[in-house]
Image (tube, rainbow, N blue to C red):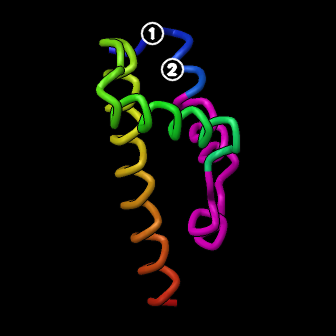
Amino acid sequence: MLAPLQANTLFSEVLDFLASTPTPEEIIAFHASESLQERIRYLLEQNRRGELTEDEKIELDNYIELDYFMTMLKIRAKKKLAES
């Protein structure tokens, strides 16, 4: 389960984006903010070093799940564009 701060940094960006009813093109072009990308890079580096705390492991797992969700969403958006 996510801590409130993690939930804000992890999901708010994507929820705000999806709430804006993006077009398929905007979905395909979506990238996380630079600050979010920096956090993910930090967590990946800490993981590589074997230095993640338990909370950071959970946070990284959640980022990975969100990345998978966004990847699947982009694939569907590309299919929708190809069909039109």
Q: Residue at x 30, y 12 (%)?
A: 54
Q: Quadrant of the N terminus?
A: top left
**What type is the residue that disc 2 sits on?**
Ala
Give the magenta part as a residue range.
Answer: 10-31
Residue 78, percent across and down?
Answer: 47, 78
The magenta stretch spans residue 60:
no
- Residue on which the image places disc 1: 3
Residue 17 magenta: yes
Q: Residue at x 52, y 33 (%)?
A: 42
Residue 53 occupies which quadrant of the picture?
top left
Q: Is the residue marked by circle 1 packed among few (<14), some (14-19), or many (20+) residues within 10 Å?
A: few
* Label 1 residue SS: loop
| Residue 14 at x, y percent in the picture | 58, 41
Q: Please report contact status of discs 1 and 2: CB closer than 8 Å, yes or no.
A: yes
Q: Is 2 displayed left or right of 10 in the figure?
A: left
The label on residue 7 is 2
- The residue under the point 60% across, 30% down is 12
Q: Position of residue 67 (x, y in %)?
A: 42, 48
Q: Is residue 48 shown above or below 22?
A: above
